[in-house]
Amino acid sequence: MEFINEYGLFLAKVITVVIAIGFVAGLVAAAGSKNRKRGDKGQVEVVKLNDRFKHMTHALKQAALDDAERKADAKAEKKQEKAEQAEKKKALKAQAKSDGKPKDSDKKRVFVLDFNGDIKASATDSLREEITAVLSLARPSDEVVVKLESGGGLVHSYGLASSQLARIRDRHIPLTVCVDKVAASGGYMMACVADRILAAPFAVLGSIGVVAQLPNFHKLLKKNNIDFEMFTAGEYKRTVTMFGENTKKGRDKFVEDLEDTHILFKEFVSEHRPQVEIDKVATGEIWFGRRAQSVKLIDELKTSDEYLVQLAEKSDVFEVSFVHKKSLPEKLGMATEGAVDRLLLRWWQRSNNQRWF
């Protein structure tokens, strides 16, 4: 009986919280839609990775070195900082003499972007904003590094994502793609745009092929005396369908379209990586990093971490990300989810007579 009482009280609390937050969400929904109409999507955030690496090294030195070693290291760091400041002043003077225009001798800047792709390549929305921001400042003497992870997805979505990367190469700015886990199918379509592709030894690459599949319920509908009618104008407006009876002519046309898409995919890879024997690799197969290097799908075996730390020794490395602003309804939805989770956890803790932080 005590359990039932506790559960009833818990359920009443949950319902009250959901109703209250839902009411507030309704009041502010209009304000959230106004924000979206203004096109206030988000903002670009930049983190200097050199500073992050330096702080990590400093923290480790504080723990691992003794007093004498720390003093000697601090002295060496100060000496290095003075030399760097003197070099910066010299560069600024040279820049002032050239009417403020940067010279190719200026310190190289590296801009790092992340792309974690789903089947719809949803991250393209952020990628296009990041690339627009980078191209407003980047010079041919700089470099853009894209940390790419994707198993592929919709043809048109990854076609657009690849076109965004092509904007960098069109401006003659060196582009490097790093693959730590996977860049297959549409993911490799993006990767091949780069001047160089680096991959971890067991990263998955390739899958240069096209696939499409769908269930067909025609026999089930027919068995239950259910008619399905579809009206089209144009011989190939719809080739195959989920509910109608598919014909040989429709299937043949559908396969023909897939083959044409495959040809376009192969031509795209060949255009950007002419060193690849396209007929040998465009079979839909995948290769792990080391094997991918042997068939020239990648240029070098190296993780993104190793490459960025290496660049940071002589370049200024900036991580650039576009952060979407959440609307008020979205924030309230997250708050509601968190409140319900906390109530569930509290009830479970009480019912099990356990204590949790």
Image (spheres, rainbow, N blue to C red):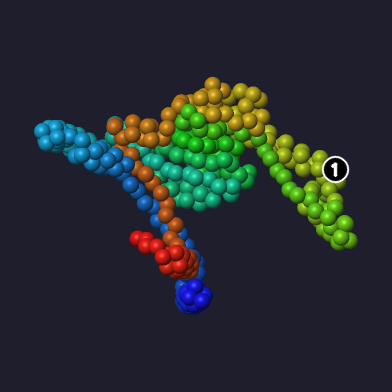
Observer-nearest residue: 236 or 199?
199
Please count the marks in the image: 1
Res. 12 in view:
yes
Based on the displayed image, in which of its 4 quarters is residue 317 positioned?
Answer: top left
Q: Looking at the image, is 228 positioned above or below residue 161? A: below
The x, y position of residue 1, in whole percent, is 51, 76
Observer-nearest residue: 230 or 228?
228
Residue sitting at x 81%, y 40% = 252
- Asked if residue 262 lies left or right of residue 182, the reply is right
Q: Which residue is mark 1?
A: 249
Observer-nearest residue: 102 or 280?
280
- Asked if residue 299 lies left or right of residue 142, the reply is right
* Residue at the limit of the structure toward the front, as seen here: 1
Tell me the quadrant of the picture where the C terminus can be found: bottom left
The x, y position of residue 42, in whole percent, is 42, 58
Density class for disc 1 (Cα within 10 Å; few <14, some 14-19, many ≥20) is few
Q: Looking at the image, is 273 positioned above or below residue 186? A: above
Residue sitting at x 77%, y 52% = 242
The x, y position of residue 63, in whole percent, is 20, 39
Identify the element where label 1 is drawn: helix
Q: Amino acid at mark 1?
A: Lys
Residue sitting at x 48%, y 47% = 127
Residue sitting at x 48%, y 44% = 115
The x, y position of residue 170, in whole percent, is 49, 37
* Residue at the limit of the structure toward the top, as seen here: 294
Res. 338 in view:
no
Observer-nearest residue: 19 or 102?
19
